[in-house]
Amino acid sequence: MSDRSNGSYRERATQAIHDPRLQRSIANIQELIGNNAGPALDQLPGGKAAREQGRRLREETLADLDVHLATLAQKIRNNGGEVYFAEDGKAACDYCIEVARKHGVKLAVKGKSMVTEEINLNHALETAGIETVETDLGEYIIQLAGETPSHIIAPAIHKSKEEIGRLFAEKLGIEYSDDPGTLTLAARKALRKKFLSADMGISSCNMACAETGHITTVSNEGNIRMATTLPRVHVAFMGMERITACLTDHELLLSLLTRAAAVQKMATYLSYIGGPRKNEHNDGPEHFHLVIIDNGRSKILGDPAFRPILNCLRCGACLNACPVYGKIGGHTYGSPYPGPIGAVITPLLFGVNKFSDICRGETLCGACEKACPVQMEIPRMLLELRAKLADGDTAWQVKRENPLDKILMMLWSFGNRHRLLFKLALTLAGRLAPLFPGKQIFSGTMPPPLHGFNRGKGLGRMTGGSFVSEFNRSAKPASLHLSGPNKSTRDSQPSKKQGGIHGPRH
């Protein structure tokens, strides 16, 4: 993965938070898709049980992943296709370049693919002298702009129609327009020439099926179908986890995917591809290659704590529900995978210490887990990553960060579990409060090493007494006297025989 970061996570987040147009754009997609995806998923046969079934199917498939991948590979080879298992991103890129050179490829058209963003395929092909053109409208826009996707299903969500109009006027040589229809037609005209002259088509794989020996691509624009049928050579890339055991499982998971991603019962273009065209066929590629990519997934598969993240359908539902993504956008994450899914998968694939900020930047509110069509426990996995950063982990090559934070949290935990120490700390804080004028203490920042804990807000003034003592001093009537958390208050409760608070029962 190339370096996508300009500045630190905090700097990028601060810049995004102060971009009102970005805020409006993300709010729109979160409202239009995020708020409606849940009801759409509940309309599946079985209702909410379908999501539980989807999670179970993904877990069962991962448990026998090697068998399913071997079955898929054999069936594709039987159909005349070729399959290559790539250990990492470099191996996958090198294989694609080798295939391109073998067939004299000069121009490749490419459908939307997150895994090729992960391995930085475009850069590798361009370096090898092979022109590579994105054909998804959103991906095409950001390629012309020299940027990276900011959303899994809406890669150009961060751009306004005015920005796109200026971009097309500069790059495509057309008259400036901010009309979406006019801009779409301009992109279609430019891309049609590329489709007709391309030597190679490159696509992703939304889901493969071991039973039938095919991969599936999902699109609403038709560009992927053109990229996979018009060129002489088709190379498809898939993460090794993107597979189902049988067609029945495949059907359910695709239904979950399309509803969660775009509130659709079915995508406009759904293509099943299992090899090159047959002699009796008029359309389709002469050569078909499937590249199955590991790139760190085997290690995740072997860790029970993180294996569930491989259940991900790449629908973007967690992004559309996440309040953090809604404020900082996709580029803040510095990864092809933004949002809650990115906050887990990116550190696991590219280094926990390197991407420690993004796994600590989420709120743990649980909105992502609620929105996920296969019920991934993203908040739990974020806590697992944070624990590794606090304690270190040799298996994941994680170095302990900020050991003082760990010590302070242990002291806080110890104090909270011992009432006398907690009471003493409150009393001491109350005695020290007069030393700080105003209604708040440390209203700017607390002194190091605590200066990050109250950034943006002050710490309220301590009164000098505990809640229990203050309540008992002012409480009326006296029967509501509190005795503290460690002493039973059973005797002070109103008697049911006396009618209690609500009076006599009739």
Image: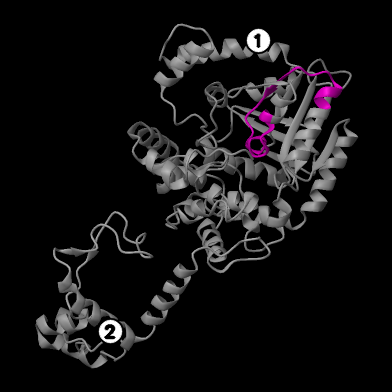
**Is any atom of residue 276 visible in this view?**
no
Amino acid type at circle 1 is: Lys
Total labels drawn: 2
Q: Are marks 1 and 2 in contact (CB under 8 Å)?
A: no
Report helix, strand or loop for mark 1. Answer: helix
Name the residue at 19% across, 87% down.
Answer: 494
Q: Which mark is residue 193?
A: 1
**Magenta span has 111?**
yes
| Front one among 75 and 90 | 90
Circle 1: is it few (<14), some (14-19), or many (20+) Cα within 10 Å?
Answer: few
**Is any atom of residue 488 visible in this view?**
yes
Report helix, strand or loop for mark 2. Answer: helix
Q: Which residue is mark 2?
A: 423
Q: Is residue 385 above or below residue 19?
A: below
Name the residue at 19% across, 69% down.
Answer: 461
| Front one among 224 and 430 | 430
* Lower position in the chain sequence, tag 1 or tag 2: 1
Q: Kindly report which numbered mark, 1 or 2, lies closer to the viewer in this rendering.
A: 2
Q: Which mark is residue 465?
A: none
Amino acid type at circle 2 is: Lys
Q: Position of residue 11 (x, y in %)?
A: 42, 43
Q: Position of residue 428 (x, y in %)?
A: 24, 81
| Front one among 435 and 406 | 435
Q: Position of residue 104 (x, y in %)?
A: 83, 18
| Front one among 100 and 63 | 100
Query: Left or right: where does residue 155 sit relative to residue 276?
Result: left
Query: Left or right: where does residue 116 sit relative to residue 199?
Result: left
Circle 2: is it few (<14), some (14-19), or many (20+) Cα within 10 Å?
Answer: some
Q: Quadrant of the N terminus?
A: top right
Q: Is residue 358 above or below residue 81?
A: below
Query: Left or right: where does residue 299 sit relative to residue 327?
Result: right
Magenta extent: 99-123
